[in-house]
Image: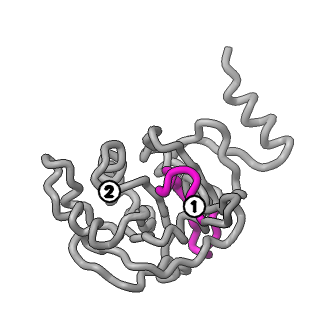
Amino acid sequence: MSLVGKKAPFINAPAVVNGEEIVENFSLEQYIGNQYVVFFFYPKDFTFVCPTEILAFQEKLEEFKRRDVAVVGCSCDTEETHLAWLMTPQERGGIEGVTYPIVADAAKVIAQKYGVLAGEYAYDEEGELYFEGTPVAYRGTFLIDKEGKVRQETINDLPLGRNIDETLRLVEALQHVEKHGEVCPANWEEGQEAMKATKEGVAEYLTKNKKS
C-alpha cells in the first residue's frame, strides 16, 4: 500500500551520524516543521550497487541542503556494521566520507512499516515461523514534506540503482508547487514553465509547447 499522502511512519532506531558517531534514538521527527526529508532504503552494507547510490547522494548533499532537505539512509544492517563500512576507504569498497545519517533497522521493522521489505514472515504447516523472500530492503525512496507527509515514493527492485538527479528534480517540483500553487507537467525541470491546474491552464501550456 502506498504511503503517498499519508504521514511518514514514526521511527526510533540507532543510526550513525557524521560518518563516525552512533546515536541510539534517531528519529525523523526532529526534521518535522523544519526541513524536507529524503529517506531512502538500500539492501545491504558491503555490497556493490549500494555504495554507488550512497556516495551519489553524498556528492549531491550540498544541493539537497541548499533546498532545505535532509538526506537519511537506512538498511537492515546493524549500526556497528554501518560504522565499519563508513570507516572503510572507498578504494576498498567502503563509503568513507559520507556524512548524512544512516539508520540501522536490524529488526526490519522500519522497512516493513515503509513497505520495502523484500519478503515477509510466515508460518508453515507445522506452525513454524520462517521468512519467505530476501530479508533486506528494496531500494525505496521517500520524499517527506515539512509537515511529515509522504509526497512521493519510488521503490526499485534490488538490482536497479536509482537516479539521484531525479530525486533532486522531484524535490524542486514539490517546492515549486508549494511556492507557486501550480502543477508540474511531464519532464518538468527547475526554471521551466509549469501550469495552472485548470482546463484553461492545461490548454495554454499545451498550445505553447506544441511541437511542430
Q: Is residue 54 visible?
A: yes
Q: Nearer the viewer, residue 85 or 129?
A: 129
Marker count (numbered): 2
Residue 7, image x and y in percent? 66, 72
Quarter of the C terminus within the rendering: top right
Q: Nearer the viewer, residue 82 or 100?
A: 82
> Looking at the rendered structure, which numbered label has been put on residue 130?
1
Which residue type does callout 2 highlight? Asp
Q: Residue furthest front?
A: 126
The answer to whether residue 183 is left or right of residue 161 is right
Which residue carries the number 2 mark?
A: 45
Residue 101, image x and y in percent? 35, 70
- State the colouring used for the structure image: one colour
Residue 142 magenta-drawn?
Answer: yes
Name which residue lies at 44% across and 79% down.
13
Name which residue lies at 70% across and 23% down.
210
| Label located before the other in sequence (2 or 1) | 2
